[in-house]
Image (tube, rainbow, N blue to C red):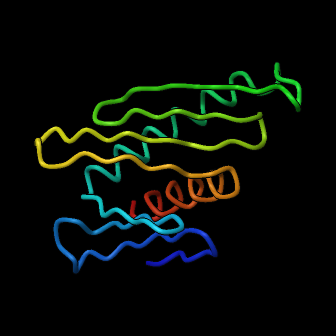
Amino acid sequence: MVKDQKNWRLLRDFKKGKYCFLIGVDNWAIELQTNEFHSLYLLLLRVNEQLLDIKNELMDEEYISLELEQIPWYVELKGKKNDWSLRFVFESQEQTRSFEMYWPIQIAQNLSYEIKRMWESMD
């Protein structure tokens, strides 16, 4: 399964073995294991839930910042209620690798939605 947009791409290929999910944004990409992708999916659900909890109380021009930690992830949402970016820090529990991802405002909502859709399509 491939979702390829102008500034980002999302790929699921179980033939690749251990690292079967790829997330790419602009000039970088990272491959994730199934359990890492699932934990990212769960984190995105939590971020969305927190945003929905406060969204009706926010004015359109009001800036917000949400921070969540759900091991192995840390995420930071910054922007306005309808336009926001996401920054992730991943610390491997297996001591194998760590990385950071940044999704700018133009793509953060679409990529979040497609990750949720991709995971839920596997059920």
Residue at 44%, 50% (x, y): give it: 101
Nearer the observer, 111 or 56? 111
Total marks in image = 0
In terms of image quadrants, where is residue 4? bottom right
Instruction: Pinpoint residue 95: horizontal percent, then vertical percent.
Output: 11, 41
Q: Is residue 104 above or below residue 42?
A: below
Nearer the observer, 39 or 68? 68
Left or right? Give the position of 116 relative to 91.
right
Residue at 37%, 67% (x, y): give it: 22
Left or right? Give the position of 92 relative to 88.
left
Left or right? Give the position of 54 relative to 78.
right
Nearer the observer, 88 or 28? 28
Instruction: Pinpoint residue 26: horizontal percent, then vertical percent.
Output: 54, 67
Q: Residue furthest front?
A: 27
Q: Could you tell me which quadrant the N terminus lies in?
A: bottom left
Residue at 52%, 33% (x, y): give it: 76
Instruction: Pinpoint residue 112: horizontal percent, then vertical percent.
Output: 56, 52
